[in-house]
Image (tube, rainbow, N blue to C red):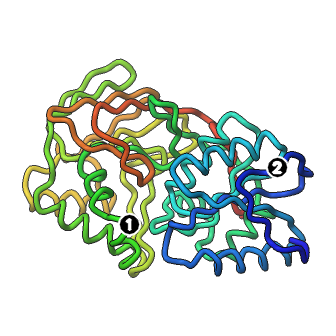
């Protein structure tokens, strides 16, 4: 960035040169103070000779609108500064355009950035946003048109996300999810799911059904714990992975968590994996649903894979 002050705008200017980057920042995400984050961003962009404009989000949908407008005005890239929910909104605004997504992690979990190998620190993430290479990744798309990069789910995972309130995340960071997971794990919610995957129906009693586009989940504030939710989950195979978790008791919960953590996915009827391009989840009773860390309602849930749905700036290595 030049020596000019940071421009805080409600929407992109009418005309911009194609070398500028639009930054969409969610002030509510994570525990890092927004003004301090902006100072660090300004310095990191300045030493790389890169110019940018800034939009602050104030409510749901702001990031999507800002990204869509920035793409229409010819910005070189749109960078999401926030958590996975902010990234999902920016992706929805960019999907179908040629403008790449950049990610600077500022949220509580930042799982999309982890899957893409984007550094967790601002300096490293800005370097990727400025000097990274563009790569296509698959997306999932909900029935209402919104896109997700990580996963959509019904049942246990959504209950955990719902219980990890903004207050808890502000106080404990990632620990809010750990607390919520332990609380939900004592009595895992079980429902009868009807899963239609590429036209084939499966019925099963389960605690959680996850539609994964990316497979890696990382808890970083603690001694780093990395979990892959299923075998060969890929964001570049044109498919969504249907990961069905069906514990019956509290010891089952512990056993399944151990099997997933140790990547022993096969040979247990409580773990079921499918791949499909189009999926519908129905359940009796209806259960809570989420996508990319945001609660969205209750079943039914419909999603499809969108191969190469967006391009992302990723590390050169």
Q: Which of 240 and 1 is in front in this view?
A: 1
Q: Which mark is residue 166?
A: 1
Horizontal side of 57 relative to 252 (left or right) equals right
Label 1, residues with CA under 10 Å away: few <14, some 14-19, many ≥20:
some
Task: Give the Cα separation between the discs numbered 2 and 1.
Answer: 32 Å
- Residue 272 locus on image (x, y percent): 26, 41
Question: Relative to residue 144, is residue 224 depicted above or below?
Answer: below
Residue shown at 57% from the left, 62% from the top: 26
- Mark 2 and mark 1 lie on one chain; the one further toward the N terminus is 2
Horizontal side of 233 relative to 259 (left or right) equals right
Mark 2 sits on what residue?
Answer: 75
Horizontal side of 273 relative to 25 (left or right) equals left
Looking at the image, how many numbered discs can be counted on the residues? 2
- Residue 2 locus on image (x, y percent): 90, 73
Instruction: Locate the C terminus and report the quarter of the image it occupies.
Output: bottom right
Among the 4 quarters of the image, the one containing residue 293: bottom left
Residue shown at 63% from the left, 37% from the top: 309
Question: Relative to residue 214, is residue 81 depicted above or below?
Answer: below
Asked whether disc 2 touches disc 1, contact meaning CB atoms under 8 Å apart, the reply is no
Label 2, residues with CA under 10 Å away: few <14, some 14-19, many ≥20:
many
Q: Which of 126 and 245 is in front in this view?
A: 126
Answer whether residue 3 is visible to the viewer in this image.
yes
Q: Which of 169 and 261 is in front in this view?
A: 169
Residue depth check, mark 2 versus mark 1: number of the one nearer the observer: 1
Residue shown at 53% from the left, 39% from the top: 147
Residue shown at 73% from the left, 37% from the top: 97
Circle 1: element type:
helix
Circle 2: element type:
loop
Q: Residue 84 carries which label?
A: none
């Amino acid at each position: 960035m030049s020596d000019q002050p940071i421009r805080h705008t409600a929407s992109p200017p009418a005309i911009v040169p194609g070398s500028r980057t639009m930054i969409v920042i969610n002030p509510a995400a994570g525990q890092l103070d927004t003004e301090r984050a902006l100072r660090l961003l300004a310095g990191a962009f300045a030493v790389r000779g890169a110019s940018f404009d800034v939009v602050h989000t104030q409510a749901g949908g702001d990031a999507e609108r800002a990204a869509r407008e920035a793409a229409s005005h010819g910005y070189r890239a749109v960078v999401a500064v926030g958590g996975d929910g902010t990234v999902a909104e920016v992706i929805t605004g960019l999907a179908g355009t040629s403008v790449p997504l950049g990610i600077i992690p500022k949220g509580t979990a930042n799982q999309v950035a982890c899957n893409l190998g984007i550094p967790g620190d601002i300096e490293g993430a800005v370097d990727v946003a400025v000097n990274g290479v563009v790569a296509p990744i698959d997306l999932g798309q909900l029935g209402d048109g919104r896109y997700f990069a990580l996963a959509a789910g019904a049942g246990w995972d959504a209950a955990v996300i719902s219980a990890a309130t903004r207050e808890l995340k502000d106080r404990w960071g990632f620990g809010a999810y750990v607390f919520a997971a332990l609380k939900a794990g004592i009595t895992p919610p079980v429902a009868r799911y009807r899963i239609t995957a590429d036209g084939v129906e499966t019925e099963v009693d389960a605690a959680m059904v996850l539609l994964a586009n990316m497979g890696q989940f990382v808890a970083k504030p603690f001694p780093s714990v990395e979990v892959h939710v299923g075998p060969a989950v890929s964001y570049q195979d044109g498919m969504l992975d249907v990961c069905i978790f069906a514990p019956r008791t509290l010891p089952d919960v512990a056993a399944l968590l151990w099997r997933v953590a140790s990547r022993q996915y096969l040979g247990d009827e409580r773990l079921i994996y499918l791949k499909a391009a189009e999926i519908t989840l129905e359940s009796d009773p209806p259960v809570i649903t989420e996508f990319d860390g945001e609660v969205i309602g209750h079943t039914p849930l419909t999603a499809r894979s969108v191969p190469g749905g967006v391009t992302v700036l990723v590390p050169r290595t």
